Amino acid sequence: KLRAQSEDAAESICPNFAEGFARYNPEDFARFVKISRGSASELPDHFDAAHARRLITAHERGELTELAIRCRKACTGLIVYLDDADPPDAKPGGRWTGTGTRNRTRNPERGTRNELITFWTFWKSSSGSY
C-alpha cells in the first residue's frame, strides 16, 4: 500500500503539469500546479514511513526528501509566476507574460523545471527497491 501511495503521488506530478498547461490559462494552470505541489508535499511522509519500515536507507530517504522539497519549491515558484501572468488573449501573440508588478529576485533555494525532471527520474529509478 505504501509503495502504491508513493507511486501515485510521484506519478501524478508531471501529468497535472501537462493538463494544467493545456488549459492555456494561467489561473487554470496554477490550480493544477497546486495539485502537483500537494502530491510533492505527501512524498516526504511516505519516505519517512518507508524508512521506518526499513524499506529504504536513511541516505535514500534524505535524497528523496530533498528532491521532493525542491519539487514543492519549484511548484510554488511557478504558482507565484502564474498568479501574476496575463491570460494568452490579453497579450499580442497569445503568450503568457508576467505584468512585472512584483519585485522578484532569484532565490537559489527555489526549484526549477529541471529539478522536477531530476526528481521524477530519481524517483522512477529508485522506486523499484520497495
Image: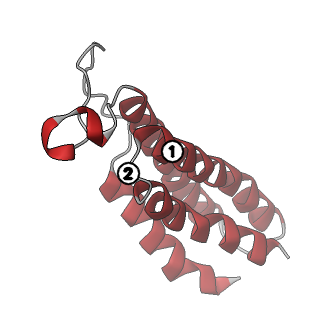
Q: Is residue 65 above or below residue 117?
A: above
Q: Quadrant of residue 129?
A: bottom right
Numbered disc 1: secondary structure: helix
Instruction: Report the residue at 49% width, 62% height from top.
Output: 19
Instruction: Report the residue at 65% width, 47% height from top.
Output: 38
Look at the numbered discs 2 and 1 and tell me whether their residues touch, using CB distance below 8 Å. Answer: yes
Q: Is residue 18 above or below residue 68?
A: below
Instruction: Report the residue at 84% width, 69% height from top.
Output: 53
Q: Quadrant of the N terminus?
A: bottom right
The location of residue 29, given as percent across then percent down, is 47, 47
How far apart marks 2 and 1 lie (CA) works out to 8 Å
Residue on which the image places disc 1: 28
Residue on which the image places disc 2: 24
The chosen color scheme is: secondary structure
Numbered disc 2: secondary structure: loop
The location of residue 94, given as percent across then percent down, is 21, 45
Instruction: Report the residue at 69% width, 71% height from top.
Output: 8
Q: In the image shown, does 95 or 43 lie closer to the viewer?
A: 95
The 10 Å Cα crowd at callout 1, few under 14, some 14 to 19, many 20 or more, is some
